[in-house]
Image (spheres, grey):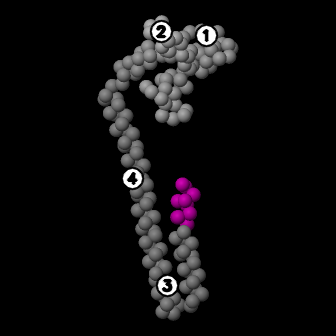
Amino acid sequence: MGRPRFSDESAYLLTGFAKCTACDGPVGTDLRGFAEPIGRHVPYYVCLDYKRRGTCTNAVALQQDIVDRALLGSIAEVLDARILDRAVDKALTRLRAGLEKHLDRRTQIDRELSLLVTKMDRLMDALAEGAAPKDEIITRLNEEKQRKERPCRRANEAL
């Protein structure tokens, strides 16, 4: 299995997941010497409260590779390809539904933005032509500018 990829990742399958049945403490790895070949260390799963603190009475030690093989074999037996396919299909359906919802909202926002830009352009044209009182046009332009910025603020707050 080699070294862990991340500092909080264990090279052992059950470390960080399993708990001692006697004290509910963490199960971890204890490297022990093995008779054949001499000097080779073999990892065992043990109660860490028993090993380090002596606060647990559970002295059971199980060879890591045997437990891992049995566990992975049991998981493989219950994993049916049809069940996995169905789970993946459900997950993709949920993701696509969320994406469609966001795309619909984006289309709506783009449409509103386009209308606001058109209104602002018309107000700028009216201001340039002097078709309406300057103060009235500037007030309306400022109102439209605030409306335009509101969806952007809400989107940034959502992030």
Identify the disc placed on residue 124. 3
Distance from the alpha carbon under mark 3 to that under mark 2: 88 Å
Please give the residue where the numbered disc 2 appears in the rendered image: 38
Q: Is residue 86 magenta?
A: no
Question: Residue drawn at (47%, 87%), measured in percent from left and top?
Answer: 125
Of pointers 2 and 1, the one earlier in the residue sequence: 2
Of pointers 3 and 2, the one earlier in the residue sequence: 2
Crowding around mark 1 (Cα neighbors within 10 Å: few <14, some 14 to 19, many 20+) is some
Crowding around mark 4 (Cα neighbors within 10 Å: few <14, some 14 to 19, many 20+) is few
Main secondary structure of the magenta stretch = helix
Residues drawn in magenta: 150-159
Please give the residue where the numbered disc 4 appears in the rendered image: 100
Distance from the alpha carbon under mark 3 to that under mark 4: 36 Å
Which one is in front in this view, the residue at disc 1 or the one at disc 3?
1
Question: Residue drawn at (54%, 54%), measured in percent from left and top?
Answer: 159
Helix, strand, or loop for circle 4? helix
